[in-house]
Image (spheres, rainbow, N blue to C red):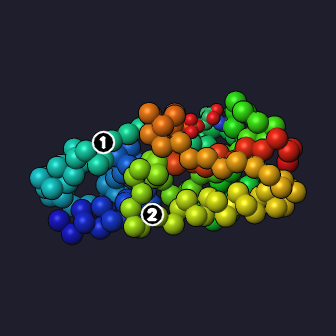
């Protein structure tokens, strides 16, 4: 039981969803678990729960994890920014938190600071590049025009970076 609670907290903190937990279990944890753990109904229930089975990695997970290429323009401990592949302005960048959250609609008190980090990173980038005027945009949910279910901030400007 204890290990499940630890695993739940750890994966929530990391923003890991089902696929990552399963990956982690099979790569790192299997050999340290006693076989009796696998008979645990709790582990089985947890792995079957909606939280763990919600989604596959998005394109932005793969960019964050360097599994697919992107034109990365900024990175720090918490944020990654890259050029939008279909720019709708002269400069069109996407800022994502390294910690996964699906969208503004899914923010919790624990993740509420993430949009602020994205805005600060965008402000920093714009200052550095001498971009004086720009638009910042969060699309929220499919009906709000959000195509990629990974929190991201659009920075758009008619000035070039
Ligand atoms: P949204 O509609 O707010 O979810 O915005 C998603 C944005 O991601 C769109 O503007 C896409 O052009 C952009 N996009 C999709 N795939 C990639 C990719 N592989 N690299 C960079 N930008 C992408």
Dot 1, how many residues are within 10 Å of its Cα: few (below 14), some (14-19), or many (20+)? some
Q: Quadrant of the N terminus?
A: bottom left
Residue 128 in the image: state x and y as whole percent.
84, 61
- Number of labelled discs? 2
- Asked whether mark 1 and ligand 1 are closer than 8 Å, the reply comes as no
Residue 82 makes an appearance in the image: no
Q: In the image shown, does 137 or 4 lie closer to the viewer?
A: 137
Q: Residue at x 39, y 52 (%)?
A: 106
Q: Which comes sooner in the sequence, label 2 or label 1?
A: 1
| Left or right: residue 53 compared with residue 39 | right
Q: Which residue is mark 2?
A: 111
Image: 161 above or below 6: above
Q: Secondary structure at mark 1?
A: helix
Residue 43 in the image: state x and y as whole percent.
20, 54
Q: Residue at x 30, y 42 (%)?
A: 53
Q: Residue at x 69, y 38 (%)?
A: 84
- CB atoms of marks 2 and 1 within 8 Å: no
Q: Secondary structure at mark 2?
A: loop
Q: Quadrant of residue 71?
A: top right
Q: In the image shown, does 72 or 118 lie closer to the viewer?
A: 118
Image: 140 above or below 121: above
Image: 23 above or below 89: below
Q: Cα distance, mark 2 to mark 1?
A: 21 Å
Tell which tag, 2 or 1, sits nearer the viewer.
2
Ligand 1's quadrant is top right
Q: Which residue is mark 1?
A: 53
Q: Residue furthest top?
A: 86
Q: Residue at x 38, y 49 (%)?
A: 17
Residue 105 makes an appearance in the image: yes
């Amino acid at each position: 039981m204890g290990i499940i609670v630890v695993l739940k907290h750890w994966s929530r903190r990391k923003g890991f969803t089902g696929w990552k937990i399963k990956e982690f279990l099979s790569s790192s944890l299997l050999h340290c678990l006693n076989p009796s753990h696998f008979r645990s109904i709790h582990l089985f229930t947890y792995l079957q729960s909606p939280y763990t089975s919600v989604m596959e990695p998005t394109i932005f997970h793969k960019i964050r994890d360097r599994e697919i290429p992107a034109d990365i323009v900024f990175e720090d401990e918490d944020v990654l920014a890259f050029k939008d592949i279909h720019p709708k302005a002269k400069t069109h960048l996407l800022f994502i938190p390294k910690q996964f959250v699906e969208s503004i609609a899914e923010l919790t008190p624990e993740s509420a600071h993430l949009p602020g980090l994205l805005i600060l990173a965008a402000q920093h980038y714009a200052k550095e590049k001498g971009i004086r005027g720009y638009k910042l945009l969060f699309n929220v949910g499919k009906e709000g025009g959000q195509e990629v279910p990974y929190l991201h901030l659009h920075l758009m400007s008619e000035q070039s970076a």
